Image (cartoon, rainbow, N blue to C red):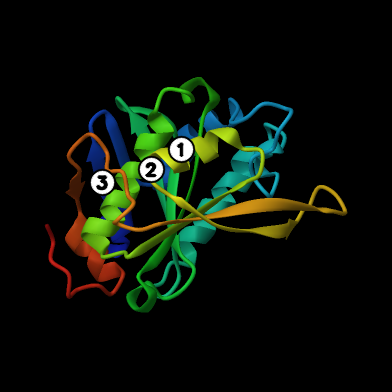
Amino acid sequence: MTLDEIFPAFALEISGGPLRLSGLRTDDIPAVTEVAVGGIHGPDFLPFLYPWSEAAPDELPTSSARFYWDSFASFTPQRWHLNLVARWEEQVVGVQDVFARTDFRRTHALETGSWLGMPFQGRGIGTLMRQVVCAFCFDHLGAEVMRSGYIEGNASSAAVSRKVGYVDNGRRRLDDPKSDGYRWEQDLLLTPDTFVRPPFAIRVRGLGPFLHQLGLDDRHDT
C-alpha cells in the first residue's frame, strides 16, 4: 500500500486559478517551515493567541513538525484537523487549515485558520485561500456553517473575512499566555447565503478516498 491509500488526506488537492492547496505531508514540512522562519508578522503585533510564530529560528522547525505530526496522529472521522500547503504559482506561501472540533457528520460545521509568509501578503492570496477552502467545504463536504475568528487588532484577517462574506458572531475573552491578562477574539460565521465565491472554478483531486476517510461515503465524488 502507499501512504496516500493509508491516509487519503495526503493526496487531496484543491485548486483555483494560480492557487493550489494540497494535503500537507511530512516531506512538505521543511518548505513550509522555511516560509514561517522567514516571517509571518511584524514585531509589533502577534496575530495568534499562542506565540508559536515567535519561537527561535532553531526551535520553530521542530515545534512545527511536532504540530503537524500530532495532527496526523489524532485524525479521526469525529475530530480532525486538515493542514493544506498553499502554493501560489507552485511556490509554497503558507498553510490553510480546516478542522472539525465537533463530529462533522452530525453538525456540518467546520472552522478555518491560516497563515501566510510576509513576502506574499497584501496580494489577495490570503483571500483566495479562504475562498477556495470554503468552496470546497460547502460544495464537496456538505458543510452548512464555517466558523473563523481573529484576535482584535488583526486588520488583515478582518479584511479577508469581510471580503469572503463572514458575519460577526460575538466576541470572547481568551487567556493570553504571554501575560496575566486576556485578549479579545472576534468570532465569525459564514454560510452559503453570505459566501462570496472565488473568481476561479474549483478543481478537486482525491476527493473520493478523502470522503471515505471522513466517513462521508454517502456523498458523491464530483
Left or right placement of residue 52 versus residue 121 in this view: right
- The residue pinned by badge 2 equals 164
Label 2: element kind: helix
Left or right placement of residue 14 versus residue 203 in this view: right
| Of 105 and 60, the residue lying toward us | 105
As drawn, the residue found furthest toward the bottom would be 106
Q: Position of residue 158 (x, y in %)?
A: 53, 40
Badges 2 and 1: C-beta atoms under 8 Å apart?
yes
Amino acid type indicated by mark 1: Val
Q: Quadrant of the C terminus?
A: bottom left
What residue is rendered at 68% in x and 49% in y? 49
Q: Residues within 10 Å of mark 2 (few under 14, many from 20)?
A: some
As drawn, the residue found furthest toward the right would be 180
Badges 2 and 3: C-beta atoms under 8 Å apart?
no
- The residue pinned by badge 1 equals 160
Mark linked to residue 13: 3
Mark linked to residue 23: none
The mark lying in front, picked from 2 and 3, is 2
Amino acid type indicated by mark 3: Glu
| Of 11 and 172, the residue lying toward us | 172
Badges 1 and 3: C-beta atoms under 8 Å apart?
no
